[in-house]
Amino acid sequence: MAMSALRREGRRIAGPLMSPHPVNLLRSSLASSERSNLAYAKIIVERKHIAGYNLENIREQVFVGARSISTQVVRNRMKSVRNIQKITKAMKMVAASKLRAIQTRAENSRGLWQPFTALLGDIPSVDVKKNVIVTISSDKGLCGGINSTAVKISRGIHKLNSGPEKECKYVILGEKAKAQLVRDSKKDIELSMTELQKNPLNYTQVAVLADDILKNVEFDALRVVFNKFHSVVSFVPTTSTVLSPEVVEREAEAGGKLGELDSYEIEGGETKSEVLQNLAEFQFSCVMFNAVLENACSEQGARMSAMDSSSRNAGDMLDRLTLTYNRTRQASITTELIEIISGASALEG
């Protein structure tokens, strides 16, 4: 009897002393229900007057609940989207500035190659054995699909002009076209050049590039693939064909449009073959100069459109995230109020 009474007395004394610690109570509650009981802890501290503990001590020891983590994640996401929107707007303004500088030069360069087209013609359907496809692309991305379009057309031309008795090679200007064509046509790449637009291009620089291509590549027809600039939101994939002097002379003898070359008189001591050689080289450099400038205009216009779309998409995403954040925060406040009321009612009852 004495031992039973002692055990009952011990349980009665140990009961209040071994009540759940407020920090342990909050941790177990958060682990089970994934919600914050900080408001309930405040009631416990105020009503029970636990010696040596206050609300700030308990706040530091309790890990953050699921709702607080979710709002923090949304805030971080909103900050990231806002920073991305600032970058895309800045890139759009830079592209617009570069476009204005290049557009006038591209329009003026069209007067260089148009007389050659009128004189020597542009015959994309000419059948020759050695074809060289000069693909012009950009060195940087984030400009829509202009590079993919140029590569797709180059592959189509390569497929049409390939055969057992034909040879078709690539000359690539620009890093993006090189990265795509090297995957499946590495053995057909004769020459590649990058970083053309690192400095403002002029006719002298392009003429040097054209001279390097003419010296290092054997061809019957050069097919220049580029994107012709129409407007900020519009560009047209274009192919210009430059024939070798031998092919021009052969086509002139066969008649057709090039047959009109025989009606011109050649003055001086140069022969017809030498004149055609000079004309072919000059024509290729002029076509290259215009193609590089047109493609640069198309690149900046496409980048402007892409960055504008990205900025608007970032704004829409920011609106959705703001709405989500406000809803989450309001739900958290409402839940806290409910917990305070429920805890107060439980303690009073």
Image (spheres, helix red, strand yellow):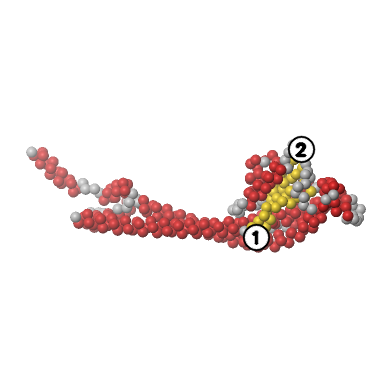
Q: Which residue is mark 2?
A: 165
Q: Amino acid at mark 1?
A: Ser
Indicate left or right for 93 with 255 as reference: left
Please give the label number shown on residue 22.
none
Q: Which residue is mark 1?
A: 231
Visible residue check, residue 204: no
Task: Judge the density around disc 2: few (<14), some (14-19), many (≥20) Cα neighbours within 10 Å.
Answer: few
Earlier sequence position, callout 2 versus callout 1: 2
Visible residue check, residue 239: yes
Question: Which residue is depicted at the point 77% across and 52% down?
Answer: 122
Q: Measuring from the top left, give residue 45's x and y in whole percent.
A: 25, 55
Circle 2 SS class? loop
Q: Measuring from the top left, give residue 250's x and y in whole percent.
A: 84, 46
Q: Closest to the observer: 167 or 177?
A: 167
Q: Does the CB distance between marks 2 and 1 fall below 8 Å?
A: no
Q: Amino acid at mark 2?
A: Glu
Circle 1 SS class? strand
